[in-house]
Amino acid sequence: MWWIIVPFAAAAFLAVLLLRAAAFRPPSEIKPEPDTVEADGSRAVESLAAMVRCRTVSRQDHDAEDADEFENFRDLLRRRYPAIHNSCILDHVGRNGLLYKWPGKRAAAPSVFMAHYDVVPADPATWSKPPFDGILENGVLWGRGTLDTKGTLAGILEAAEQLIGQGFVPENDIYLAFSGEEEIAGDSASEIVSALEARGVVKGLVLDEGGAVVEGVFPGVTAPCALIGTGEKGQSAIYMEMESSGGHASAPPSHSIAGLLAAAAVRIESRPFPFRLTPPAAEMFDTLGRHSTFGMRLIFANLWLFRGVLDRICRKSGGELNALVRTTVAVTEMWGSSANNVLPPRAGIGLNVRLMGGDTSGAAVERLRRISGNPDIAFRKGVSSEPSAFSVTGDDAAWLRLKDAVSRTWPEAIVSPYLMIAGSDSRHYCRISRNVYRFSAMALSGEERALIHANDERIPVEKLLKCVQFYIRLLQSC
């Protein structure tokens, strides 16, 4: 009888899979009513151009920073935003932290809007236009920081200045928190959180840089996707090092320490960390998977069966999709002999490890030690930060306010949680809030995202205007 039962069972099993895929559709939801928000785009461009001209390059060696440029930036804010400075209470926190309190009608559920005003270095010789001149040409503003994150900082302040000027008073207190040392993982953001914690402030919503409105990042989805980070990976600098007696390169050993380290690096690259679905990634697959092709819906609707298939898809694609589902290891540094004809007395390789929730930097070191296969390699852990906690979504009021503002600004976009694979200052706020979200209020192409920290960073002015409009909508809901 088995030869009769098995085909029927297989057919029934396949039917269940197909029915689940067919039913894996977006839930019906009420879209927000279209609205119009007026904002002064020309003023926003002028403000951002002026911010770009302040060369607020942060450096690990603080003595190498130009303190006058940071003070010029803060003075610019005082001159450019008189309504904010007349209505809000400003505290200088730490080296370069700015914390504005915009008093609302009550303090029960305050919100925090974050950005940073420090930038990474820019070599004028490698740019098409001077990186700190704030040049506007053909509807595009050029300059370091236009995307990361003086653009969003200008969006926040332009929105707040306009609303205060119109007499708007928020329902709850609003804090504007700006760090001047995010790019070097400085202490300002953590010190701002400590200051708020000491005052007993518990956040209703925290918004920092992170996701954006993007296209073509999820298999089978053609619509724009507004990705909001509800968690972020940790990161750790891990070093593999070996020592030898050195010597002349004319009589080398069978394997030099540089060669042994290289072999260990290859073993590590060929043995990735295991597939793991954290809540942000699982929510993203559930949300966007429902908008995908039938073949992809078949996978996402039946992950209990196709988990291994998804794992292989992510590993093969690499990049952002793969980084969403596993701890990643990138070989970023190598050093050895100072001369071509000298065997290295000391050699090393630097690994940049981005930690998935559930992994720790200590556990990562031990795993890499095992995979290296060489007990003579010394492993050393450098600067590290652990993965963040995960924020709430679903029917949470703060999440719904944020989602509504996004949908009103980009009505064609699918709003989805996601796991932020880079790091931000927002991780510090997880100490005092379950509503920490990461969204850079811009629609960015792949080319534009690649300009962050790169040459020729720039922003189209219409995207800056939409950024201001988004913050007006969100501030009004607070």
Image (cartoon, helix red, strand yellow):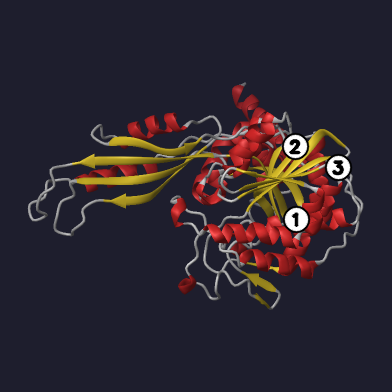
Q: Residue furthest top?
A: 1
Q: Which residue is mark 3?
A: 28
Q: Amino acid at mark 1?
A: Leu
Say which element carries label 2.
helix
* Residue that appears at 44% across and 57% down: 64
Q: Residues within 10 Å of mark 1 (few under 14, many from 20)?
A: many
Which quarter of the picture shows residue 206? Answer: top right
- Most foreground residue, 167 or 208: 167
Q: Amino acid at mark 2?
A: Leu
Q: Which residue is mark 2?
A: 19
Q: Which residue is mark 1?
A: 157
- The mark lying in front, picked from 2 and 3, is 3
Q: Position of residue 2 (x, y in %)?
A: 60, 22
Classify the position of the N terminus by image quarter.
Answer: top right
Q: Residue furthest bottom?
A: 138
* Residue that appears at 88% across and 48% down: 31
- State how far apart marks 1 and 2 are (Cα): 50 Å
Mark nearer the N terminus (1 vs 2): 2
Q: Residues within 10 Å of mark 3 (few under 14, many from 20)?
A: few
- State how far apart marks 2 and 3 are (Cα): 19 Å
- The mark lying in front, picked from 1 and 2, is 1
Say which element carries label 1.
helix
Is residue 395 visible to the viewer in this orientation of the structure?
no
Mark nearer the N terminus (2 vs 3): 2
